[in-house]
Amino acid sequence: MLWAALSLSLGYNATLVTLGASLLGAAAGMAGTFLYLRKNALISDAISHATLPGLGFAFLVAFGFGIDGRQLLILLSGSALSAALGLYFVNWLTRETRLTQDTAIGCVLSVFFAFGVVLLTIIQVIPAGRKAGLESFLLGSTAGMLYSDALLILILSIITALVLFVFLRPIKLVVFDQGYSETLGISVRRVDFIILMVTLAVTVLGMKIVGLILIVALLIIPAVSARFWSERTNIILVTATLFGALSGYIGSAISAVSPGLPTGPIIVLCCFGLFLFSFLFAPKRGVLAVALDHYRFQKAVHLTQGLLSMAAAQPIYEPKTQRLLRRLGYIRADGVATETGKSLAAKTLLNEKRWSYWQEILKESDQLDGQAVFNLMDIETKLTPDQIKSIDQGLALKQGERM
Amino acid sequence: MMAGVALVSDQGVRLGEAREPGEEPLNIRGLTVSYGQVPAVYSIDFSVKSGSLMGIVGPNGAGKSTVLKAAMGILPLISGQVTFFGKPLKEARHRVAYVPQRASVDWDFPATVYDVVLMGLYPSLGLLRRVSKADKAKVAESLAKVGMQDFVDRQIGQLSGGQQQRVFLARSLVQQADVFLLDEPFAGVDAATETAIMGVLKGLQEDGKTIISVHHDLSTVSTYFDHLFLLNRKAVAYGPVAEVFTKENLSIAYGGKLAAAQLDTMGL
Amino acid sequence: MGSEFVALGLTPVLISAFAGMACALPGNFLVLRKQALIGDAISHVVLPGIVVAYLLTGQVSTWPMMLGAAGAAVISVVLIEMIRRLGRIEYGAAMGVIFTTMFAAGVLLLEQSDTSRVHLDVEHALFGNLETLIWLQSDGWGSLLDPLSLAQLPPQFFRMVIAFFVISAFTYIFWRPLVLISFDEAYARTIGTQATVIGFLLVVLAAMAAVAAFDAVGSIIVIAMILCPPATARLLTNDIKTQVFLSLILALGATLIGYVAAGYLPLWLGYSNTLSAAGMIATVSGLLLAFSAIYGRHRKRVI
């Protein structure tokens, strides 16, 4: 069954939903990366919660005009409008008052959501309202979705992804290099606006599939996960897009074969699975790699400092350094240096002197970016024998001058 | 047993005497602090003699503020030992006052000048003890020292940068500490404030206090300080200004970035 | 305003008033510490907390659920902090990862278990059931003096009152360190304040308020009450004591106005049904904020 869903052979609707969710995930991953890099991730939380009153209001207005308020397009339009209003209020509060953005986000999302709940209690009273199933927008539900709905979501998702693609270059410029983009005459405000509008579109489209509470996850988690894999923004962007698409694809496929499961939570948990893997195992930025590096680095620092003190015949005060040297057999229990210790200390001192001299040379020619970390590595493994030779000559010359 | 060995930095510059962690107001040895894999400061040794007014000087990103923050226990250490008057910070806290960078806090906080200066008395006030007349007098006295006596009830968000810096200094004064660590006290302040702060610091020194201040304006170094700690991720040199503030040392610390013309204006 | 009100209206009003004040109190410091959205995170993870508690104990009883919710709140805060530090991710994004995931897990567990039989559902978690907290044993205002009928008050009432007083006591006792870590945490550490501990306790108390309030008034009102009254108060004053005091008054005011509006507004408009009281209270707190954002004496930054 799951294979049938994954290979998109589980009926028309399920296929459309799966495609829509994947596209949506991809768009969310992309938009989310921009939000994250602009340090604005949680604005998506305000946008998503602010859709609720619009949803209720659209239903009520449609009902008032005698139109079937369950029309997805009407509901989505209402949601988009109120989300935009919520966004406006967040910006207004941040700009016009002394409140910080996080406070503004929290206030707007809670008040809008609460007002949405008030509207829902009104809708509950209307006979047609009870059947409207607006609650399904809270957590997403693809079960019993109409063919036209699925098609609508798919088409709108394609449009959103296309818009994002068209504006990709200016957005990337602003996100990655604001100063440079300004010299090119690209308006940062306009680009920020486009990012927010795409976020809004993703949120509104995701309501039916993921639900408005959890769409935030699709906008934040892929971007955060992708950040672990690279320092290069292009790669982060592609990774986040892939993660988002993958989560949407697998999540909606799983829920297609088990209709009891709400789609939104499954998609979010897929997202989180990818996050957890990245968080733990990503090379360089992953937690395990960082912990290992930190341990090695700390050990190297203590060892170098200890050996240098030994070379200069200075006492070593730090217990940690003493323990380390003792464990490695460089000093005896009573603190006296062993033969291995002595020779290694001399070697470390020479290494240190060579590095320092090399740094001076770099400094004079202004090539140094101030990385004292060099001193911890064996210079003979990092520089060519010729370079080392010239360093040694320079050192000998300096020694001569001082004499 | 090793006391008296001259410490020589790898650049061959005399660093001073290596001593057992003694009674110096601040003694740091083997201090390494890193953000990630790049050390912000590496294997720093230095100590301050009691009663000195010491400037910490070095180029941008040299780790000047990092040294102070690490000494005050705000940053985790990779290695190193920090003692105040021969004791770890925990046991010497009442003798140490720290003045953070002005920009490190949000001044749009609902508090008055009085409220902020009173924070310096929190250790002695504890959780619930009422603020006595004597405490209020201490606050007033400190504010008068920095020339802010007329601003007691002023909202801190309404102060100029220089005034905010004076408030921070006043807060450290009420702590009645013996050693003061100041992080960039002259960053973004007006000339009058700079003079006023310098006056307060000299006054503290006359009372036998020790002052250590991060500083980045080389042209005022010799007039402001009597001791200097020159740093660029590694300790370059420390000691009396006359010995440390030399062309040779500066070129080690600043590299090619410091033009010869600049050195000339400093009379070096 | 007779015995009918005492039986049907008094307890919901009192419970939501105490809930609002209990949330607003720690909210002041969360707003000043730029941790406003931690309230958002906490209120989302309450759901998985109670679901797990139910799955473990197999019954819908109060204390396990309260503990489960509080536990989930604490776990979420620890996880957020862990991800932030170990993964070097900014605070907001770390929160976004954790609370959405925990909420999703909660919903999934809920759907997978048979909890729907026992009156435990997502909507209840979000909207609360304020309207059912009635005091049928009462017999007019006189019952307030009758210990026997007082004992019959809904248990939510006592929990909320206790939570409020615990939070008030904490705020009173730890006022100085709370102000200090909110203004200048680094300095606080240098003078020996246990900034991490106090900061953590603050979040735990916000969680306690959220959990106690959640059962009665639902989680949406929690975020609104943690943030709106303190934010409103901040725009009305420049003194932190006044701000905290005002935030309590505003929470109380929003509750009273909101409750009355939910109950009577539809009646005046000719409808017979009432609106969601919790939703209305939060809406009113938002209106109060909007009002102070336009007219508040201290709404603008000076510089």
Image: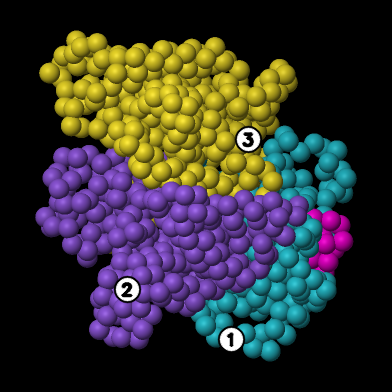
Chain colours: A yellow, B cyan, C purple
Q: Residue beneath label 1, please?
A: B130
Q: Position of residue C36 (x, y in %)?
A: 50, 53
Q: CA distance from mark 3 to mark 1?
A: 58 Å
Q: Is residue A69 left or right of residue B152?
A: left
**What subunit carries mark 2?**
C
Tell me the residue at 16%/52% (across/down): C118
Res. A151 image quadrant: top left
Main SS class of the magenta portion in the image: helix
**What subunit carries mark 1?**
B
Q: CA distance from mark 2 to mark 3?
A: 72 Å
Tell me the amino acid under the disc marked 3: Glu
Q: Position of residue B210 (x, y in %)?
A: 68, 71
Tell me the amino acid under the disc marked 1: Arg
Q: Residue beneath label 3, please?
A: A360
Label 1, residues with CA under 10 Å away: few <14, some 14-19, many ≥20? few
Tell me the residue at 30%/71% (across/down): C135
Residue B131, magenta (yes or no): no
Front residue of C198/A11: it is A11
Q: Position of residue B248 (x, y in %)?
A: 73, 44
Front residue of C39/B69: it is C39
Q: CA distance from mark 2 to mark 1?
A: 33 Å
Label 3, residues with CA under 10 Å away: few <14, some 14-19, many ≥20? some
Q: Is residue C52 left or right of residue A104?
A: left
Circles 2 and 1: CB distance less than 8 Å?
A: no
Badge 2 and badge 3 both on one subunit: no
Tell me the residue at 60%/33% (across/down): A369
What are the residue bounds of the magenta stretch? B189-199
* Res. C158 mark: 2
